Image (cartoon, coloured by chain):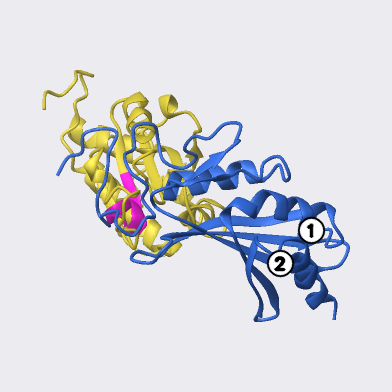
Amino acid sequence: MTEEKRRRPPAGQFITTQFNSLLGWARKFSLFHYPFVTACCGMEYMSAACAHFDIDRFGAGWTRFSPRQSDMLLVVGTITHKEAPVLRTVYEQMTEPKWVIAFGTCAVSGGIYDNYAVVQGIDQIIPVDVYIPGCPPRPETVLDGLLKLQEKIQHQDHDWRWKKKRS
Amino acid sequence: MEEKTILERLRKEFPAGVKEALTSLGDEVAVIDKEALLPIATFLRDGPGEFKMLLDLTCVDYPGREPRFELVVHLFSLSRNRRLRIKTGIDESDLRIASLTSLWKNADWLEREAYDLFGVRFEGHPDLRRIFMYDGFEGHPLRKDYPLRRRQPLIPLKE
C-alpha cells in the first residue's frame, strides 16, 4: 500500500471503532446551541458566531432559539438573582444530552459585580462543562472553549440507550 | 443674565420654599423645601422657565447627615436650552414626598426606581411598586446601610 493510500483509504472500506466513540464523534460535530445572551459578551458571541470567526467550522453553527431544540447552552453575560429561575428553567427544558458553556467572566464567577444583585457564577444554579474566561473573551478564546467541549464530548461516557443517568 | 432671572424669579415666587439658589459648573441649582416641591415644579414647568422635560430623578443617601436622603431632579427647557437642578432633603423618619407624575409622565418609572433602591415614598404615584428588584426582596439595596453582599436568591444555590 502506498503512503497516499494509507492516509486516505478509498471509499467502500470500513473502519473499526467503539460505539461510544462513534457517538461522541457524531455528537461533538452536531451541537445545536442556544445563546442565553444577557450582556455585552453578546457582541463577542455574535462575532464568534458570524462569518469572521464562524463557529460553524466546528459543527456548532446551528443556532436554535428554542431550548427544546438545542443541546449546548451558551450563557453569555451577567446573571442576576432575578433572572436565575429563568436560566434554570431554560436549562431544564433542553433535550438530553446537554452541555453548558459559561461565556465570559460574569457567567463564570460574577465578574466585577460582587453585589446584592448578581449570581456569583452560574454553576451555583446549573452544572457547567466549560468555563471561558475574559471580559469579554476574544472569539479565539471562544473557539478554544468550543474545541475543549468537543474533546470532552468525544471522551465522555455516552448513555446511548437514552436512559436518564442517575446522579 | 437669563440664568439669574430664573433663580431670582423662583426666590421671589417662593420666598419660603427656596432655601438656596446657586450656580454650579454652569448649571443652576435650587435647594428647596420638601413641602414646596410640587408648587415649585409646577411653576418651573408652566412658568417662564418652560422646563417641559424631566431629564432625571434620582436619590442620594448621605448616612449620618440630616436629612439623610436627598432627592435630585434634573429639568431641561427645550425652548431655552437651559438645565436646572432641584435638590430636596428627605428625612429618614418621614420618607414621604410629593410625586411628580402629574407634571411629567416619565417620572413614573424614575420614582419607582427611587422607591425600589432607596425606599422613598412618593405620595400620589399611581403605581408605586418595585421596578428592578423582585417581589419579596427585603430592604432597599442602594442605601448605604444595606450590606454589600447580602443576596436574596429566588432559588436555592449550590455551593
Residue at numbered disc 1: B51
Label 1: few (<14), some or many (≥20) within 10 Å?
many
User: Amino acid under label 2?
Assistant: Leu
Q: In the figure, what tint was chain A given? A: yellow
The chain to which mark 2 is attached is B
Quarter containing the C terminus of chain B: top left
Left or right of B152, for residue B110:
right
Quadrant into which the N terminus of chain B falls = bottom right
Asked whether the beta carbons under mark 2 and mark 1 sit within 8 Å of each other, the answer is yes
Chain letter for the blue colouring in the rendering? B
> Badge 2: how crowded within 10 Å, few (<14), some, or many (20+)?
many
Residue type at the position of mark 1: Phe
Q: Could you tell me which secondary element the residue under label 2 belongs to? A: strand
Q: Position of residue A160 (x, y in %)?
A: 22, 24
Task: Look at the picture and state if A129 lies above or below A16.
Answer: below
In magenta, the rendered stretch is A101-110
Residue B15 falls in which quadrant of the image? Answer: bottom right
Q: Position of residue A12 (x, y in %)?
A: 36, 33
Asked whether residue A31 is drawn in magenta, I would say no
Lower sequence index among marks 2 and 1:
1
The numbered dot on residue A102 is none
At x 51%, y 33%, the residue is A65
Q: Nearer the viewer, residue A34 or A118?
A: A118
